Image (spheres, helix red, strand yellow):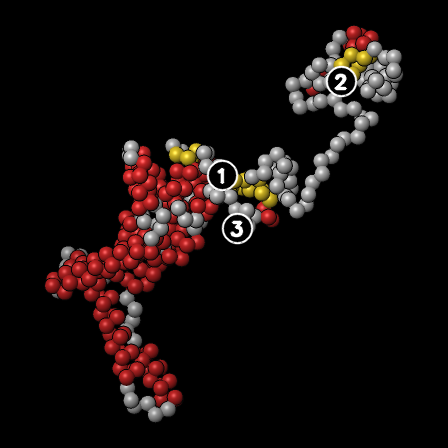
Amino acid sequence: MKYEGVQCPVCLKAFDADSDVVVCPECGTPHHRECYDKTGDCINAVKHGTEFAWVNPLVPPVVAETKKEKPQVAENPSVIAIGSLNKENMPKNGVIGEMSPDQMGPTYREIKGDEKIGDYTVDEYASVIQKNIPKFMPRFMMFERTGRKVSWNWAAFFFGPFWLAYRKMYKYALLGLLLTFFIPLVFYSSVTEYYQESFNLYGEALTSEAYQSTAEMNDALDTLQANMPEQPVAITASSYIEMAVDILCALFGNYLYMQKCTGVLDKAKAMEDAEKKKAFLEKKGGRSVLSIILVIVAFYAFMIAIGVIVNLAGTDLATFLQKFIK
């Protein structure tokens, strides 16, 4: 008998070959029939409904052999230990951090293509992102699950509005450039006057042939530095605003990009022709260096137009408004 030698949990006497044993159908605990009838129920009845299951103490547990070189969890091969994450085993659509009960510390799991992020699947978002899918997909899922709008994007921090243009978010890119140069545009006359005077002084110093030695050159440069015009407050303020714009791009760039991708999918949803839909997603999604060039050209064309208007008017906006401010 497989229970021979095991103690009855009621009377604590060991079962022998002739024992009349009753096994609980719920958890598998064995009892003497007499003991079971005496208690009227399983001795472990309070544990029923949980994950408790009786284990024979005389039978050693079977331990599954694990291979150290494969840190994946056996029950879910898509779960990858943080130390083994690399380009070769990076999932197609990105990874998301989760805790695994079978391993110490955080692990990452693959985001499946049919998982939903709002109204669309991961694969549908991937068709718009096209490049660097593992970078954006976990963040999109985080936005959806937590309701947050903030994450950090280093590329957006270093390149600001130009990164927005790179990801074809033209309106935000132009808005970022406009905010950066808004104050210099308002004080256009003083800013251009400062740069013209500075360039003239530098030009005179660099093209002069009167320097006979290094000491004379250094003296001339010191004189140049002393005669340089004072930098307008507008330029200083513009540098702070540029930093603020870059930080905002870094904090909200991923969320804005998710909104952009969602808008593209909303428009593509109404298209019945599969080929036209595919072409639309390829055109509106992905990234483009040409977009950066177009945004720069458009913005500096706007700057030139402002310069022409200021020259024709003979004044900039700040000087014009000063006439009405006492």
| Secondary-structure class at tag 3 | loop
Determine whether, in the image, residue 325 is placed left or right of residue 133.
left
Looking at the image, which is closer to me, 66 or 13? Answer: 66
User: Which residue is disc 1 drawn over?
Assistant: 111
Which residue bears the numbered disc 3? 87
Residue holding disc 2 = 29
Mark positioned earlier in the residue sequence (1 or 3) = 3
Please state the horizontal and vertical placement of residue 191, each as a whole percent of the image: 24, 66
The answer to which of 114 and 36 lies nearer the viewer is 114
Amino acid type at circle 1 is Ile
| Quarter occupied by the N terminus | top right
Determine the residue positioned at 56% across, 39% down.
78
Q: Secondary structure at mark 2?
A: loop
Compared across the picture, whether 93 is left or right of 312 comes to right
Q: Select label 1 or label 3 by which is in front.
A: 3
Q: Secondary structure at mark 1?
A: loop
Amino acid tagged 2 = Thr
- Residue ranking furthest to the left: 312
Instruction: Tell me how far mark 2 sits from mark 1, CA to CA.
Output: 41 Å
Q: Residues within 10 Å of mark 1 (few under 14, many from 20)?
A: many
Picture coordinates of residue 158, whole percent (x, y): 40, 57
Question: Residue at 61% across / 34% down in the picture?
Answer: 75
Residue 11: x percent and y percent? 85, 15
What's the residue type where badge 3 is placed? Lys
Label 2 vs label 3, nearer the camera:
3
Query: Gap in Å between the C-alphas at discs 2 and 3?
Result: 50 Å
Residue at left offset 26%, top offset 75%? 199
Q: Are marks 1 and 3 in contact (CB under 8 Å)?
A: no
In this rendering, the answer to whether 149 lies above or below 31 is: below
